[in-house]
Image (spheres, grey):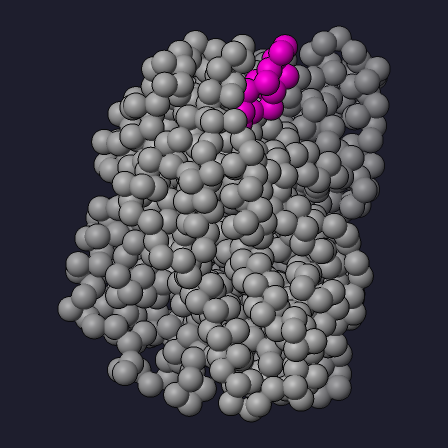
Amino acid sequence: MPKNTSIKSGERRDATILFADLQGFTSLSERMDPEEMDALMSRLFGAFEEIIVSRGGVVEKYIGDALVAVFGVPELHEDDPQRALESALAFLERNRALETELAPRGATLSFRIGVHSGLIATGDRGAFKVVTGHPMAIAQRLQAAADPDRVLVSEAVKERCEGDYDFEGPLALSVKGARDSIAAWKLLGPAQNGLSDHSPFVGRQDELEELLRLYVRHDPAARSGLYLVGEPGIGKTRLAHALAERIARFPEFASPVMTARAQRYRPVRYAVIVDLVLEYFGLDLASGPQAIASTLSAFPGIEPMHAERFAALLTPDDPPAKDTEIVLSLFSVFSAIMERHARAVYSAFLFVDNAQAMDRQSREFLAYYLKNGKRKPFTLMAGRDQPQALRDAFPELKPLRLGPLSREESVSLATAHWAEIPDRLLEAALSQSSGNPLFVREYALFAKKHKDLSSLPGTIQNMFIASLDRYEPGTRNFATSMSVFLLNFDAAEATRVYEAAGGDPAFVAGAIETLVADGVLAECCGRYSFALDVFKKALYASILNHNKKVLHGVVADIMLGNVARNRLRLLYHLMKSERWAEAAETIRTDPARNYGYEYLDYIDALYKRLSRSSPEAAVQLLITKSALYFNAGKIAEADEELKRVMRIAVTERDDLCMGFAYHMICAHNSMSASFQKARFTGQKALYYYRRAGMAARSVQNVIRHIAFAEIQRNNFEEARALVEQTAGIPGRDDFEYSSTVAEARLFSGDYRGALAAIDAATPGSGDDDLLVARFFGLDLKLKILWQLCDFQGLAPAAKTLLDAGDLSDSSVSQAQAMLAASSTLFGDGKTAREAFMQAEYYADKVRNDFDRVESLRTLALCQYVAGNLRKAEAAARDALVLGLRHSCYYPTFTALMLLVQIASGRGDDEEARFFLSEASYFFSTGLLLPNKDAIIYYYYASRLQAGDSARKSAVIARKLLEDEKSRLGDPDLVANFLSVRGYGDIENSIDGIREDRP
């Protein structure tokens, strides 16, 4: 019994359902005595159950005169659909003999059979094991539509078996409870061509050429061939098909191609050899022993005795012949086939797929024939591995391991199955398939059908789950329960989860050791993870949804007990365990929540769950979502969320919601240069925040936006007064206060005062709760250092910021640009090139036009300082277009001045005058403009203008330059300032000009 009683017995898996119903039961029962009828039914269904069980299936239940069988429960096999079809055909053949007995009574026994594969759930109902799921209803509907003594299969079964069986169709059937009809196919029998594959053959050209070379050089008197090794789906079978296709096109090719797929649990002795022979003669198990014996007897070189012994292998009721007799007969049959083609130009080709599952008797006989037969076929085998028994039996078959396809080959294969596959789904398919051809195909087809790849195709899931069959149940259950971990786990965590799943804690160490040794798990620094993510997904998909919820809750509890925990991983497990309130609290208590863009994936689901039970928490989630969109530059999306918050605020008359809405509008107005509106909406935000008793930090942030608006309007005294208002707020956030002070000093030109303020307030590393403050403190410091022209201190400061995170693409882009400029100035070209590339990359990622203007302005400025004039001009032009569109005059003025300098530098005074004229209008706004760029403006005005205006401009440029030098103070910093952007040349050019000079 599981120690955790909340864990249910059972699992989810992709299984194959066989539904068979007896026709004519009523008329037959009228003709027979009840006891005789009972004996007949026991014999009939007993035979069917024997056939099913012998092929790895189970009879799930009897419903009157119907039988339901499941393949894939309790043990899963990669070829469960094939096993179901083989069982159906074998039973119909067995039933024909019984019908012959009943013919004198005028009764017939016909069965209609339906087969379907799909997702089912297993579990307990009282003392019984049960299987539930919609696939049961589909199989029943297929059975009802089948003709007597015929099998009807679904599209899912047909797709997975069409290489082994032939079908006719499709037919459209309606299913109760389903909106759409389903496609049904009539099963005709085993495929007439046992080695055909119409799927595209991509890659593997070197391997194919090697096989062709070996085949052409094969000497029928000697043993030769290859053993293809590789993971399931890697393309072993398709490569064999390609070889068969190529040699079939050889001139005068008339040699036999004999194929078989080894399977476990076959009821027939020498099963692989039987399949090889039947496939050669175009027969199958449904042909019947008499027809098989007759066909073989008519073949030259096969005596009737040997033909009858062979046919007797297919009749379980007959007394078995001795192995020595069987081997003699099989040797005779094989020799006759080979001798029939003795004069053929090319050798016979024999292929055994899934060879690691070959039964012992087939293996021993084939090894005996290849050693002693007069004429030997070229032999090719394929399997996921090459067991020692096969290496000993067939030493001539050297292994050829197949690896994954290249990306180009994978793309070619995926588009062959869906030419119009969108890039998003193509990338997902390639990522998840890891170059495995079968996975590429299944993912592409799954995406084509569902337009989504969030879940795992059933074929792939079954393949991995079936591969665990070699382990004992405890190891399989352990591996499955570990799949709930998002990334990795240690032994202690594994023990808690496995115990919660009902396992024995003492078993964990051995299970981990076994799975690591076999490559299922990978170990790093005492933590374990699945070597293949798709393997983990397959196991996870098999867990009952109820059990997933319980186990995710256990993992969440483990993480809550750890001081150092990853919030996103914790949130994932809380969501999966449906602990909604705790998940919302995890987001709310994150200091960096307004920059945790990954939270967007969870907020809507949480809001839906909490909007009624916890409306305040739900509104906080909407507020966070709006802030996230705003900080990500998705202004339209932020506005939509803001409308939702405002609707709630108006409807509920909620002060907090009103305050937040006005806060966001104020921030947007401040960013978009609508400074008067920023002042008004900021005051409204403060009014509602104070009524709601909002935390000091939010109040301070609103005041900061208002102060910034006043600074941009050149109202420095008003801004200073606003900032000082926050100094005495109870519970004041010191970083918010100090960074606001630093920002005001920076724009006023007090660079040293700004640096002192921000240095004193920026938190150190190591405190995750202050991560946001640290990042933006460093960001502000970097801008101050740039204005100080402290190019030596710029590089380490930029690196420190980049190490602090990437909360803002704009900030990261500007840090990389400044790092590049500093590196250039100090002769580190390699670092400069790499940093500029990163700066351009992050600038392209910025989606907020206002942040993008700032990023492009800084990038253009740094490229100019580094001497990259072409790139500087391109970035400046992009900044100009966006800046003019949004009336962002402060950064746009810098872009214009750079374009004036670049145009003048190449002698294009006309273009320089155009940009200068455009900039002249900015002065009429009364808004703040960058000090250093104003120097550039007046200097070039003095050069490009004439007469008195030119002299006045030169005087102003001289004064502004002297003022900027006094702000810097330090001689080294002044020297740095004069070394960039031509400020030294400007100083020399206008030296001696005085305001009183005529």
Q: Residue at x 67, y 88 (%)?
A: 30
Which of the image's four quarters has the C terminus?
top right
* 243 and 644: which is toward the camera: 243
Percent x, y of residue 102: 61, 73
Does residue 205 show up? yes
Q: Is residue 245 located in the magenta-colored stretch of the structure? A: yes
Q: Provide the residue span drawn in magenta.
A: 244-257
Residue 255 falls in image quadrant: top right
* 406 and 423: which is toward the camera: 406
Left-right relation of 921 to 994: right
Q: Is residue 320 located in the magenta-colored stretch of the structure? A: no
Q: Residue at x 80, y 61 (%)?
A: 172
Left-right relation of 483 to 951: left
Q: How many marks?
A: 0
* Relative to 456, residue 544 above or below: below
* Relative to 991, residue 482 above or below: below
* 904 and 716: which is toward the camera: 904
Q: Residue at x 52, y 18 (%)?
A: 341
Does residue 465 show up? no
Percent x, y of residue 976: 46, 23
Q: Residue at x 68, y 51 (%)?
A: 188
Residue 568 falls in image quadrant: bottom left
Which of the image's four quarters has the N terminus?
bottom left
* Relative to 873, residue 692 above or below: below
